[in-house]
Image: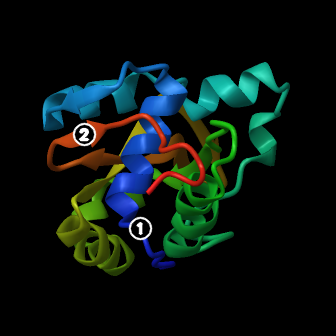
Amino acid sequence: MAESKEEIFDIYCRFMLEHAGAMHGRYSKEDLREQVLRLPHAFAVGLHKDRLIEEYRIIPDDAPIEGWVNDKVVGMVERGAQWEPEAFWMSQQTTLGLKGWNAWMSLDAYFMPRGLEPALFIHNERYVFKGITYYICEFRFLPLRSFEFRRPMPSGAP
């Protein structure tokens, strides 16, 4: 995972609060989680952009979860891009065994000490292909501690 000068926790919380239109101030862990959950869901963003569900990738069959998170979530946040989360398909078997999945445990081991809990959101959109049930999912982080959301310092300020 990419590591920048500023902590990923601070970058993620600031990004989410800015995109949620939140006021500056101190946010508890619970308030931060509420703000994260208020943002438009990836499935809705995809529908708004006329994206066909057949275009979504299958995790981990088409792409590893670590690469997806680094590119589509951490990358989006670090670039300061617009809020455009991407949904993906995940098999029912993988979603049920998530906590024991090595790739998921790696995400936990990396991000939890940095104050971010990996979270998989499973939408009620289900698809059966060749006898395998898939669900539309999206990935977000849930903050594990409070955060002070401040106005950016003007350039040239001490």
Query: Which quadrant of the rendered structure holds the C terminus?
Result: bottom left
Q: Can the viewer see residue 132?
A: no
Question: Quadrant of the rendered structure where residue 106 is?
Answer: bottom left
Q: At x 82% / y 26%, what residue is drawn?
A: 49
Q: Which residue is mark 2?
A: 148
Residue 46 coordinates in the image, percent (x, y):
72, 31
Q: Which residue is mark 1?
A: 6
Question: Quadrant of the rendered structure where residue 11 is?
Answer: bottom left
Few, some or many C-alpha atoms within 10 Å of disc 2 (few <14, some 14-19, many ≥20)? few
Horizontally, residue 154 falls left or right of residue 62, namely: left
The amino acid beneath tag 1 is Glu
Q: At x 40% / y 39%, what residue is drawn?
A: 121
Question: Quadrant of the rendered structure where residue 57 is?
Answer: bottom right
Horizontally, residue 27 falls left or right of residue 149, namely: left
Q: At x 25% / y 47%, what residue is drawn?
A: 143
The amino acid beneath tag 2 is Glu
Horizontally, residue 151 falls left or right of residue 108, namely: right
